[in-house]
Image (spheres, grey):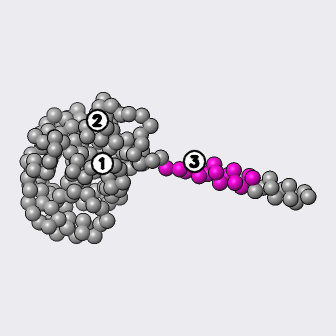
Amino acid sequence: MKKYISFIVLSGVVVFTVFLYIDNHRQPAAETVDEIIDKEELYAFGKDLNDVLSGTQMPDINCIDISGDSIKLSDLVTGERVLALYYSEMHCSSCYEKQFDLLQHLPLDSTKLLVIGAHSSHRSFKFYWSRSSYSLPAYYIDYISLDWYANKYFFPYFFILDKDLTVSYFHVPDQKDVEKNKRYVLGVKNNFF
């Protein structure tokens, strides 16, 4: 009888421990944010860049799609604005691929996204994107096309790009705080799209 009671108690402890483990490691739903993020908080996400660049205009650079067709940046902003992600192949690959994963799995219309990739050549860009599993609207630029203050961080960064090429609401993703990056993207969606 003692063995039977010990077995029941031990089984209960195991089940309870497994439940606690699962509850503590459960990922929140991708499309939820604990609180609504307002524009002021979005600005604070990238305050250093926003203080310098918000309200300025990007140059209307030539972008090239994976098949080699050239298109002006202004023609890629199909609506009023897009959420843009700039990355360079010289950044650590996990730094930009984490952001690709984030964009791929969040409920944001792909017509509201733009990925701008600086590579050493279109061939390098094409090689990367043709072998990737991402289905994001990505365009190649060469390194010298976009030489501005934001590139001093040597990390990928998000920003809002308006139809007239005015930029705002920058965010340099925090590699250790995925939830913060998710909150930024969902905050942009909730406030602008």
Q: In the rendered image, which quarter contains the C terminus?
A: top left
Q: Left of 170 or right of it: where is 19?
A: right
Residue 152 visible in this rendered orientation of the protein: no
Q: Left of 111 or right of it: where is 41?
A: right
Query: Which residue does the numbered mark 2 point to in the structure image?
Result: 191
* Helix, strand or loop at mark 2: helix
* Residue at x 14%, y 48% (from the top left corner): 78
Front-lying residue, 86 or 78: 78
Query: Which residue does the numbered mark 1 point to in the structure image?
Result: 108
The earlier-in-sequence mark between 1 and 2 is 1
Magenta-colored span: 12-27
Query: Which residue does the numbered mark 3 point to in the structure image?
Result: 24
Q: Is residue 34 above or below residue 62?
A: above
Residue 188 spot, x, y in % from top left: 29, 40
The Cα atoms of the two marked residues, 3 and 1, are separated by 27 Å
* Helix, strand or loop at mark 1: loop
* Residue at x 32%, y 60% (from the top left corner): 93
